Image (tube, helix red, strand yellow):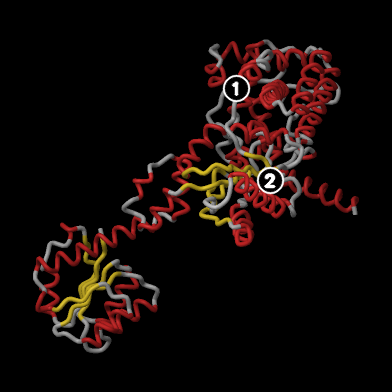
Amino acid sequence: MIKVLLVDDERLALEYLENIISWEYYGFQLIGVTTDSEQALQLYKKYKPELVISDVKMPGMNGLELVNEIRDYGGKSHILFLSAYKNFDYVKQAIRLDIDDYLLKSDLQEETFLKKILNLKEEIDKEKAKSQYTTGIIMEELFNKNTPEEHYKLILDENDYIRIHKKYFYIILAQKIPPRFLDKYFGQSGLPAPSFEFEFSNACHSFQEDSQIQTAAIVAINKNEYLAVLNVDSSMISQMDVTEKLYEFSRRIFSKMNQEQEHQFDIYYYNKKMSLRQFGRFYHENKNQLSQRYLKKRAQIMEFNEFKNNEQQMKEPKSITSEEIYQMIKQKKKENIEQCMQIIKKAVTEESYFSYLWYIKNMFEAISFFEGALSGAKSGRKFSLIENSALYDFRNPNDLVDFITFKLEEIWYIISESETIAYSSVISSAIRCIREKYCDPQLTSAVVAGNINISTSWLSTKFKEEVGIGVSDFINNVRIEHAKKMLDEKDYMVYEVSEQVGFTSSQYFSKIFKDFVGVTPNRYRKNHMDKEGLLHETEK
């Protein structure tokens, strides 16, 4: 519904105006009908109507003065003036105040009036629809959702509609990040990922003048990737010249974006002209090549091309599973594990993405089986995948290899204290289920048993026999280890930690935390901060 304010100092004229049409039937809502222009201004500020219909000549504040107040207030409402007589001076002032139309009261017939306000309604509906979009947002939808351009025909004016049909060139800014599968084990910080869209946009615009390149839009592909939609006048130059211009423009953006944080962003440029919607399809069909940046030791500028998957390369690595690696680690078959590590290192050197990803994912899965399930018989030391992870830069594939090597040695050291760890496949499945679902407050031994298709009583007996503690204690142990990691980051309130690791109340969480750790969550955080402060003092 479009909100309408009616203003006329003559009560009979106002009543006529109020009843001249069925307002609601045509999609209007009368939010105010008043003979007082001062009251009209207050109604305007309170309800912010999209259309004001007002008499021009009124005692006190006249119609022109009322509209002037509305404009000073920042109101951009449409205005229809009514007047009992023609006055050219009024018309000139009305034009200055951006009035939509001017109607003589002598011409105020239902048909004439209805035609005018329905024309205004069409304009208002268009503006309201368009206000929900900027051209950039529309381009983002064209790119990500493959929405037909015709969908926006009634929303955009002619020039903007032409813009979304045009053919462009493109560059992609891709932030260097750790492989995404690691989120499963280390989670997110809880803080929103920093956006570099503003910096990227500024860089593009700052270099466009002397590059003969214009930035049509910046599109957020996801939280780590951004797309610059570029106009390059290619009518007078060769394809080779276009490629050189795009590369040079990309090089300057690359330098600007990486000057403060070394090796943080890759740039991909696409040197063939196509519409944004076409490029969106092309990107989604070929985006796997961006994942190969996980194996790049340094940020680079690369051409974005059609990505041809090597089927043999994709099939070849699938010769080992996480369960097999887990058994190798548990049985301390170090030669077999070393062979796996050599394959990973070779994949890093040769930038063989599929082989690397297959082995590295299964290696992490296998190592994570020991989380919360392995403790030294003598030292009581519990294996934690998260512990010391902050010392490694997981954006660097070599650091990731070093971390895995470190964790393998840690597991073997703890196992050497007690060779009694040898979980059956059923208990291994139960542990895996707990590790994946620990943040669900409904997780119980019955839920775990149901997930692996065995009875609750049998699981409880078998779990206690093999692991040494009950299922509930094991669930709490996994939750507390994750809670410690969150508290170490200092950005969470205790109740937030409690909720995110699966406890239904912060009081119960604090009790269990103290039972397992020996101190309350707040004391644990304070102790951690004190240690960090001491470490920093020592480093000075």
Residue 504 position within the rendered picture, expressed as x and y whole percent measured from the top left: 55, 37
Camera-nearest residue between 116 and 331 = 116
Q: Is residue 495 left or right of residue 490?
A: left
Name which residue lies at 36% across and 77% down. Answer: 71
Residue 234 position within the rendered picture, expressed as x and y whole percent measured from the top left: 54, 50
Label 1: which residue? Answer: 433
Q: Mark 1, mark 2: which one is toward the viewer? A: 2
Q: State which quarter of the image contains the C terminus.
A: bottom right
User: In terms of image quadrants, where is residue 199?
Assistant: bottom right
Residue 53 position within the rendered picture, expressed as x and y whole percent measured from the top left: 22, 73
**Local crowd at mark 1 within 10 Å, few (<14), some, or many (≥20)?**
some
Name which residue lies at 54% across and 54% down. Answer: 233
Q: Is residue 516 above or below residue 468?
A: below
Label 2: which residue? Answer: 265
Q: Is residue 49 left or right of residue 449?
A: left
User: In terms of image quadrants, where is residue 385?
Assistant: top right
Name which residue lies at 34% across and 46% down. Answer: 150
- Determine contact: label 1, label 2, CB under 8 Å: no
Residue 478 position within the rendered picture, expressed as x and y whole percent measured from the top left: 67, 29
Q: Is residue 232 left or right of residue 397?
A: left
Amino acid under disc 2:
Phe
Q: Can see residue 370?
A: no
Camera-nearest residue between 20 and 253 = 253
Checking the image for residue 495, the label placed there is none
- Name which of mark 1 and mark 2 comes first in the sequence: 2
Q: Is residue 334 above or below residue 482?
A: above
Q: Is residue 203 above or below residue 39?
A: above
